[in-house]
Image (cartoon, grey):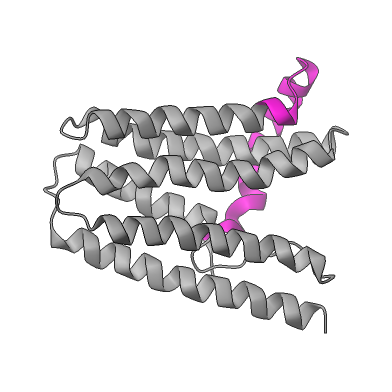
């Protein structure tokens, strides 16, 4: 199923010169991964502490774009500059789910939002990523299938943060949007499991 993840090769081409420069400067993939996680927590903390202000919400789309770039860079540093490691693989997978939790759970502080929906989205996001990783254990490749992968979630929450930061009043429409995200996460998990089983058949 279609996913923003399919745009990753084009995005990587744009970032490749910067990645080469970072490699020459001695920056490692693990340092980039760690920086992405720490910045995720910092951004989430700002939203959590100042939900009534507009500026923290505007930070969300800006940082989510930066996070996607950092994730692409750490992958290229690992693959193209001989920095692959077991620690790096562990940091990459754990970093993704920790960053999602740090960035998305603070949305639950909005009075108009159902906290349970936000928690369920974070939980299902973790399960969908775990499904993608477990595919390796049954002999398939790491599955990144959509329709609600990491990049897709970043787009939705980034757009939501931008809307709130621009002064759009929160309301019941947000819960409808989150309900759609939740349903698509269920579909994503099933899709990844199915594709893994078919690949390994």
Query: Does the magenta segment cover residue 18?
Result: yes
Instruction: State whether the magenta stretch is mostly helix, strand or loop.
Output: helix
Q: Residue furthest right?
A: 82
**What is the total number of numbered labels drawn onto the structure image?**
0
Q: Quadrant of residue 177?
A: bottom left
Horizontal arrangement in the rendering, residue 71 relative to residue 80 (left or right): left
Q: Is residue 36 shown above or below 186?
A: above
Q: Residue at x 29, y 34 (%)?
A: 48
Q: Is residue 4 rendered to the left or right of residue 22?
A: left
Q: As drawn, is 2 to the left or to the right of 118?
A: right
**Quarter that holds the N terminus:** bottom right
Residue 13 makes an appearance in the image: no
Q: Residue furthest top?
A: 25
Residue 168 drawn above or below residue 66: below
| Relative depth, front residue between 10 and 30 | 30
Q: Where is residue 68 drawn, in percent x and y?
A: 55, 42
Q: What is the quadrant of the C terminus in the image?
A: bottom right
Whole-percent x, y for residue 176 in the image? 24, 67
The residue drawn where x is 84% and y is 33% is 83
Q: Can you give x and y, in whole percent of width and height, for residue 11 in the image?
A: 61, 45
The image quadrant of residue 166 is: top left
* Residue 148 seen in this snapshot: yes
Q: Position of residue 143 (x, y in %)?
A: 69, 65
Q: Quadrant of residue 113?
A: bottom left
- The residue range painted magenta reads 4-31
The residue shown at (44%, 55%) is 122
Residue 49 among those drawn in magenta:
no
Q: Is residue 119 left or right of residue 172?
A: right
Q: Nearer the viewer, residue 107 or 166?
A: 107
């Amino acid at each position: 199923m279609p996913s923003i993840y399919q745009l990753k090769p084009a995005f990587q081409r744009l970032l490749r010169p910067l990645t080469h420069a970072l490699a020459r400067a001695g920056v490692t993939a693990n340092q980039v991964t760690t920086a992405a996680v720490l910045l995720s927590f910092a951004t989430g903390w700002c939203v959590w502490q100042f939900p009534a202000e507009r500026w923290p919400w505007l930070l969300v789309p800006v940082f989510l774009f930066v996070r996607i770039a950092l994730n692409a860079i750490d992958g290229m540093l690992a693959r193209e500059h001989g920095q692959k490691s077991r620690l790096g693989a562990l940091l990459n997978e754990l970093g993704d789910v920790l960053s999602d939790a740090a960035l998305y759970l603070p949305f639950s502080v909005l009075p108009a939002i159902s906290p349970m929906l936000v928690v369920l989205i974070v939980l299902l996001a973790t399960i969908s990523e775990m499904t993608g990783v477990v595919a390796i254990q049954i002999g398939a490749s790491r599955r990144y299938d959509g329709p609600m992968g990491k990049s897709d979630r970043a787009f939705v929450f980034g757009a939501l943060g931008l809307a709130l930061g621009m002064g759009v009043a929160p309301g019941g429409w947000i819960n409808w949007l989150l309900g759609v995200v939740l349903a698509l996460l269920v579909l994503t998990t099933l899709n990844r499991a199915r594709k893994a089983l078919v690949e390994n058949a």
